[in-house]
Amino acid sequence: MTALILLLLAVLPALTIVAALNDLTTMKIPNWISVALFAGFFPAALAVGLPLPDLGLHLAVFAGALVAGMAMFALRWIGGGDAKLIAASALWFGPGGIAMFLLAVGLLGGFFCLALIMTRRYAPLFVGASPAWVVRLMEPKGDIPYGVAIAAGALAAFPDSPLVLLFIGG
């Protein structure tokens, strides 16, 4: 049973890594990733024994994150894939972990953006015969694949998330 629970809990880290790699190489996060994150939450939550009222609170956090993500998308601050990935990931963190998740996304996202901007400044010296996705990533005024920051924040916050704490008995 423990192996099954670990496999169910691995859904969030695995899918956010896939999302980050997709965003980094294509500047897109496929919808199936967010749908799979949403669907994968429920068996994981049931497996670790998340109480039903807490499940409702996790859904409320998801809804709030989705509305906030839609607003940021409408303002052109983030892409649609980013908005859906934040909401689907927020579902896993619920009210007990959302602050740490968002803090980690913000801090790691800021660091990632600064690093990418600085790299872009000097990229023309090194891009040369790089793959097309690297050339696109290094365009001086190109988009920022923020799915990388969302994934990094999810990975950083996940060990202290409510589902993991329930699993380890903390």
Image: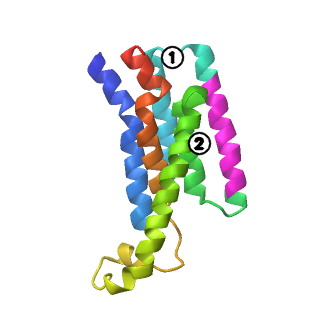
Which circle marks residue 139 in the picture? none
What is the quadrant of the C terminus in the image?
top left
Which of 67 and 39 lies nearest the eye of the viewer?
Answer: 67
Which circle marks residue 87 in the picture? 2
Q: Which corner quadrant of the image does residue 160 belong to?
A: top left
Label 2 is placed on what type of residue?
Answer: Ala
Which circle marks residue 50 in the picture? 1
Question: For the point 43% across and 21% down, which residue is it?
Answer: 165
Label 1 is placed on what type of residue?
Answer: Leu
Question: For the point 44% across and 73% down, which residue is it?
Answer: 118
For the magenta stretch, what is the residue range? 57-72
Measuring from the top left, give residue 25's x and y in whole percent. Answer: 39, 66
Examine the residues drawn in magenta and state their main secondary structure: helix
Measuring from the top left, give residue 14's x and y in whole percent. Answer: 36, 42
Q: Is residue 43 above or below residue 131?
A: above
Measuring from the top left, give residue 52's x and y in whole percent. Answer: 59, 15
Q: Is residue 109 above or below residue 117?
A: above
What is the quadrant of the N terminus in the image?
top left
